[in-house]
């Protein structure tokens, strides 16, 4: 698992210590590092008239007035094949709570999974991923109800009986970082937009079961994000 949280702290310290050097290539705002890794969208719950704006951006120890979000990405084997996961967790004390995530699947038979060539092909600008599970799709998840107390209560695109929506890749760029005491990690930033509906979690209707589905949707619009994927 690659943890970009520590990376942001390193860059803040480096930026503040090099005032006499040339302008840093990364964005700064009021002497606080602003990460290029983020997601922003509007959502509307059942019975809600207006949309609510939501944003998660990689945080910093040096800005204690804002929430600290930790971005993670890793690969795993699922019942639908190898998958790449990117998720966001908020750090509260010693605990991390799930907030938002994206899950992508590799196409069966592909070789050199998650290598530079594979990821560049998978996330080629213009590519689209329909909401749902399986190759060519993305399972978008969002913990919008009492996530501090019920960590696993996350609404998911795959919960909806008829998933509706898609994620579109708009741009990619080379990116690398070095965590304290670790080697440099190479990969790329994936810029994307997304919009659609996902199935709402319902603890009383057995959402914890593998085959849970619902017709109750959580609407998401005007979504955009930039996330990091590492070359393996």
Image: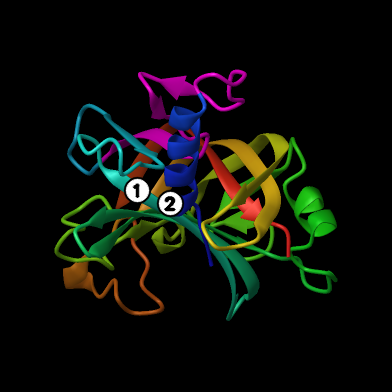
Q: Is residue 9 left or right of residue 118?
A: left
Residue highlighted by disc 1? 69
- Residue closest to the eye, 143 or 31: 31
Marking on residue 5: 2
Q: Quadrant of the C terminus?
A: bottom right
Q: Nearer the viewer, mark 1 or mark 2?
A: 2
The percent position of residue 96, horizontal first and vertical second, equals 28, 62
Whether residue 141 is visible here, answered yes or no, is no
Within 10 Å of the Cα at label 2, are there few (<14), some (14-19), or many (20+) other Cα atoms?
Answer: many
Q: Is residue 97 left or right of residue 168?
A: left
Residue 38 is a magenta residue: yes
The percent position of residue 100, horizontal first and vertical second, equals 38, 52
Within 10 Å of the Cα at label 1, are there few (<14), some (14-19), or many (20+) other Cα atoms?
Answer: many
The percent position of residue 123, horizontal first and vertical second, equals 72, 47
**Circle 2 sits in a helix, a strand or a loop, which is it?**
helix
Q: Going 19% across and 66% down the picture, which residue do you hit? A: 150
Q: Which residues are magenta?
A: 19-44
């Amino acid at each position: 698992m690659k943890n970009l949280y520590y990376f942001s702290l390193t860059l803040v310290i480096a930026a503040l210590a090099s005032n006499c050097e040339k302008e840093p290539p990364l964005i700064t705002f009021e002497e606080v590092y602003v990460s290029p890794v983020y997601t922003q969208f509007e959502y509307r719950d059942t019975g809600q008239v207006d949309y609510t704006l939501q944003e998660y951006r990689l945080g910093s120890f040096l800005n204690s007035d804002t929430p600290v979000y930790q971005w993670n990405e890793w690969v795993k084997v699922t019942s639908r094949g190898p998958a790449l996961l990117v998720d966001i967790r908020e750090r509260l004390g010693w605990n991390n709570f799930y907030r938002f995530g994206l899950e992508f699947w590799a196409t069966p038979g592909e070789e050199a999974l998650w290598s530079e060539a594979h990821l560049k092909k998978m996330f080629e600008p213009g590519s689209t991923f329909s909401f749902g599970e399986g190759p060519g799709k993305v399972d978008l998840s969002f913990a919008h109800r009492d996530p501090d107390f019920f960590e696993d209560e996350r609404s998911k695109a795959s919960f909806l009986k008829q998933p509706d929506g898609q994620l579109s890749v708009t741009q990619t760029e080379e990116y690398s970082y070095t965590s304290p005491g670790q080697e440099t990690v190479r990969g790329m930033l994936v810029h994307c937009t997304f919009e659609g509906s996902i199935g709402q979690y319902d603890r009383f209707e057995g959402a914890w079961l593998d085959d849970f589905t619902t017709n109750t949707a959580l609407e998401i619009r005007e979504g955009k994000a930039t996330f990091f994927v590492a070359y393996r």
